[in-house]
Image (cartoon, coloured by chain):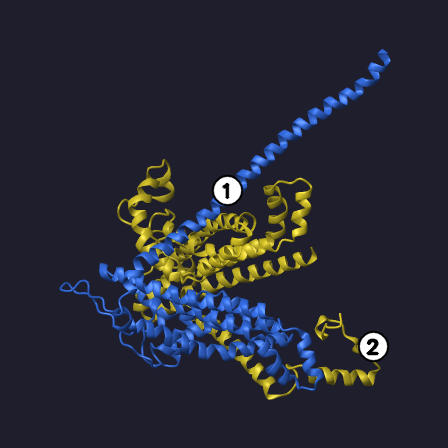
Amino acid sequence: MSDLVDLQSPHEIGHEMRDEIRRISDHLRRRRQVRSTIMVALCGVALAVTAVPLLLLLFELFHRGLPVVLHTGFYTQLPQTPSLVAPNVTGGVSNAIIGSIVLSAYAAVMAIPVGVLAGVYLAESDSKLATMLRIIAQTMAGAPSILMGLFAFSFVVRALHIGFSAIAGSFALAVLMLPVIVISSEIAVRGVPNTLREAGLALGAKPHKVSMRIVLPAAVTGIVTGIILAVSRAIGETAPVLLVIGGGYINSWKPLNPVSALPLSIYENAKSQWPSLRTQVWGIALVLVVFVFILSLSARIWASRKQRAR
Amino acid sequence: MADRGADDGVDFTDLLPPDLQRQAEVVAEFNSVTTSRTWYHYLLIVASLVFAAVSVGFVGTILWNSLPEWAHHSRTLLGGRGWQAPIGPFGGLAMIVGTLETSLIALALAVVIGIGTSISIVFLIPRRFRNIVATLVELLAAVPSIVYGLWGFLVLAPWMLTTVNPWLNSWPFAKAIFGNPGQEFGTSLLLASIVLAVMILPTFVAISREVIAVVPQDLIEASLSLGATRWQVIREVVLPTARVGLFGATFLALARATGETVAVALVAGGVANVQFHLLYPGTSIAAWIATQFGESSSTEISALMALGVILMIINFGLSLISRGLVNRQRKILAVV
């Protein structure tokens, strides 16, 4: 009998070891889980840390900006410098609104044809020129915007003797928009299925007809989305226009006149000594942000609708 | 397989007899937009050349205008202190140091917080809200930088002055790191770094969220099935797989921070001192160009152009690095 008990003992040792192992592994698992909970919670904290300043920023913007933008004079009047007699007279920002529209319109006219066609070329070609252009486009897309201002200053204002003008600002913005449009057009054209091209060629269409009549219409959603995003980026840029548009105080649609722009008047009013101008500046910022939001939201919604329709 | 075009790299023309090979080449050339000799083809080429010319002109013009300054004062530009307008010498050290300080501190803040945020967006937030949050992040990335600058200047700077500066100075050793400007400055290098961090966070999160979201689900499920906890999956599987892409996003954010102009011009204080105490005002290359340009003489403009060249070199270097890293990530994920 004792032999049998002895025979069972390894078995019991096994039991003990198993319990021991289970205890240790329970302990380790608990530790892993506690650690996991803590770290994942920290990630949640990071989300909160990101969200709080950004939401505060949006809150301040609407809270301080809304009272300003509710006056119609804000959109229709020219700016006035407050004086000691009338410290609260600030006028409106009609010149800046018109200036921003003029600047981005001329910039778009300059940048869109070149950008889209260059993008189509990049999508259709694998030549050395195309490879080089692709690298150039991606590098230029991240270039600091102040450098576009320096370029426009030396080229348009000085070398061409045009002077501080809307067209110089648009040129700077066009240089800023070009690489963005090139890249997004290339991606859009590349996204068109090859079967469409081959179907066109098989029916006997000439290659340029295929590209113009089949590929471009199929890619137009992506191209337009890219253009809208480029415009919405350009309209908010301060640095390039700061150096070259001259800050005009009249409503002007002419390309050779100095103009103002929304971001520029934000920059100038923020530094002003007058509290009334520093109050008004939130209204200008709100108008600018709403404008940018509408542009990029519409691009996004339109793109996703079209995608679903396909 | 039938719908693959000629662009997948397989070329069957080698198998044809020689006379038909020539014919196939002619057909291929005829069918390609970019080699067929039509007005459309020339239009595309001209547009591309215009784009190339603009880009080359962009770099060339700035270089050309900075040449007089580089020729005579290159050492002052890179290592000199003090900016004596209007005739010089123009020392660029303060701006270079200020650019590096503000953007690196901003980057450190933004990357740590940003990776945590992207992980929460991808793994913590309920699926329903994920798209909304992603859209919100991308909208915030589109907010013009001047608005961040305005917020920093009119809201944060007074708050720094009344609350944060005294609080920081109540710490031991804090004076050694931050300095003690008392009630004088609300704008400072530290504030510029914070505003930059808040500004690049949406950009960084927008990219890193995508990089993290495309980590293959198989890998995640495999490690979950082996009993890994959530954090273990994130640390051992998700982050290593996304590593290269995250580096790419980091360099892109750094490039954006170094090039930021008006926000820094508003909140950094605009003083050209080499300053390592972060609560004192300073400046950066881009902000200095923006604030000095208005009243500058032609020699000073050439010095500012030279600063622009330094900024361009920093920025282009960073974007080339980030481009290479993102491409490598794409290849890694293609293999997985």
Disc 1 residue crowd, few under 14, some 14–19, many 20+, Cα 10 Å: some
Q: Is residue A30 left or right of residue A7?
A: left
* Residue A230, horizontal then vertical, whole percent: 47, 70
Q: Quadrant of the N terminus of chain A?
A: top right
- Quarter of the image where one finds residue A92: bottom left
Q: Residue at x 75, y 72 (%)?
A: B2
Q: In terms of depth relative to the viewer, which is nearer, A23 or B16? A: A23
Q: Is residue A294 left or right of residue B229?
A: left
Q: Verify CB contact (< 8 Å) between mark 2 and mark 1.
A: no
> Can you tell which mark lies on residue A226?
none
Q: Is residue A294 left or right of residue A80?
A: right
- Whether residue A308 is situated above or below residue B258 in the rendered picture: below
* Residue A53, horizontal then vertical, whole percent: 40, 51
Discs 2/1, front: 1
> Which residue is labeled 2 in the image?
B15
Q: Amino acid at mark 1?
A: Leu
Q: Is residue B271 visible?
A: no
Q: Residue at x 29, y 77 (%)?
A: A251
| Letter of the chain that mark 1 sits on in the rendering | A
Chain assigned blue: A
Q: Amino acid at mark 2?
A: Leu
| Letter of the chain that mark 2 sits on in the rendering | B
> Which residue is labeled 1 in the image?
A42
Q: Residue at x 58, y 78 (%)?
A: A216
Q: Give the Cα separation between the discs numbered 2 and 1.
A: 61 Å
Q: Residue at x 37, y 37 (%)?
A: B173
Q: Are marks 2 and 1 on the same chain?
A: no
Q: In terms of depth relative to the viewer, which is nearer, B13 or A52? A: A52
**Chain B appears what colour?**
yellow
Q: Quadrant of the C terminus of chain A?
A: bottom right
